[in-house]
Image: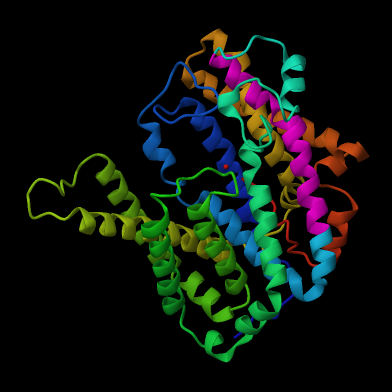
Amino acid sequence: MTRTDTGRRYELDWLRTLAFAILILYHIGMYYVADWGWHIKSEQTFTGLQELMILTNPWRMSLLFLLAGMALSLVLPRISRLKLLRLRSKRLLIPLLFTMFVVVVPQVYYEALSQQLIQPGYLQFWWQYVNPVTDLLPDHHSPIGLLTWNHAWFIPYLWCYSLLVLLCYPLLNVVSQAGWLQQLQGRYALALVFGLMLWAWWMLKADFPSTHALVDDWYNHAKYFLVFIAGFLLARQDLWWQQLVANRRVWLVIALCCYCLIIAERNDVFDYYSGPTNSETLHNMLFGSVLVINHWLWLLAVLGYAGAYLAKTNSPLLRYCNDAVLPWYILHQTLIILFAAWLKPLAIPAIAEFPLLLALTVAGCYLGYELIRRVALLGWCFGLGKARQSIQNSNSTEPLSVTRPVS
């Protein structure tokens, strides 16, 4: 049956907060992991860190889009589409512009500095960074020069997906309430999204590697928009939700098995090319199937456990996180890079540097948010203010339950 309750979905709030906590750890891990490019890299890198990060890498951003789709689905019956578009645009596009022109600049600066592509001088660099016709770092240019959204790519993607759903809402609303969908067993819905994502992986991934540039990122769009729509429909189907929570242990066990298979394949445990009869196409299809199953079952597992244990759990900490998560998301990667650049010359052993970098990042996000929420102009630049209160009063699971974060 279609979900009709209006109570706050605390599990969505908790999952968004926990996903962001993982994001901070993941981006600090990018500083230390070997063989994966990032803005700056530690002199101490570790290959084994890749396998730990692969545990969440395939699905951590999909979780945020899934939660965003669910939140948008729950809020739409209570706010007009035009008003919701206006509120969401204020909440997303203004912070995006502020992030591009101010917050991410140190990321580009320290990356270029670490590669010895520029001379020290932050203000001179910033002036060239905001100049769309600059000739500085031509190999790093986009159609708008050096301007970039870096880790904040989630924000424009979310705005575009939300716009598409708002435009198509009458059709989606009819589909979500259709009797055949309400009676459809979850396993058939799951088989459908498996098949769609496997098709996207097979047809698009090789030709459209991830860019986060919005206009040419077709494999990511196929993946993330599918997840977004799945979240939209899931939020309205009690039958699916009940089955998802009831089978959470099954999802977790299978997801762990898929993760182990992925790690085994990375370490050449399986040798599919040792004989002339082995098929590369078959290998790719099998491996792609494992990747897709791994992706979706981790999503189902975390949703299932959250639905079982966090649905009625509220606290002052959660209320703080609901307000703070967008500013923290915007700030965190720049702070990681700033502090890493300052700590790097000290050559502190990684076992001590990692917790110090984590503590500095968390402290910086906390102090930054405390300043942001006390200064009206900063609050507006970071998506706080009356727009948030308006949505909160209309629906506890407001769409930026959605816009919360992040890469």
Instruction: Pinpoint residue 13: horizontal percent, then vertical percent.
Output: 67, 57
> Is residue 366 toward the left or the right of residue 391 in the image?
left
Q: Viewer-proximal residue, 362 or 102?
A: 102
Instruction: Pinpoint residue 31: horizontal percent, then vertical percent.
Output: 51, 26
Read off the magenta span.
Answer: 87-115
Q: Is residue 200 magenta?
A: no
Q: Does the magenta stretch include residue 101?
A: yes
- What residue is at 27 percent from the left and 54 percent from the top? 284
Instruction: Pinpoint residue 298: horizontal percent, then vertical percent.
Output: 45, 57
Main SS category, magenta section:
helix
> Is residue 293 toward the left or the right of residue 237 in the image?
left
Q: In which quarter of the image is the C terminus?
A: top right
- 9 vs 114: above or below: below
> Is residue 238 toward the left or the right of residue 294 in the image?
right
Q: Can residue 330 be seen in this view?
A: yes
- What residue is at 59 percent from the left and 74 percent from the top? 233
Q: Viewer-proximal residue, 125 or 11?
A: 125
Instruction: State which quadrant residue 169 falls in.
Output: bottom right
- 377 vs 194: above or below: above
Q: Viewer-proximal residue, 248 or 233?
A: 233
> Is residue 20 toward the left or the right of residue 287 in the image?
right
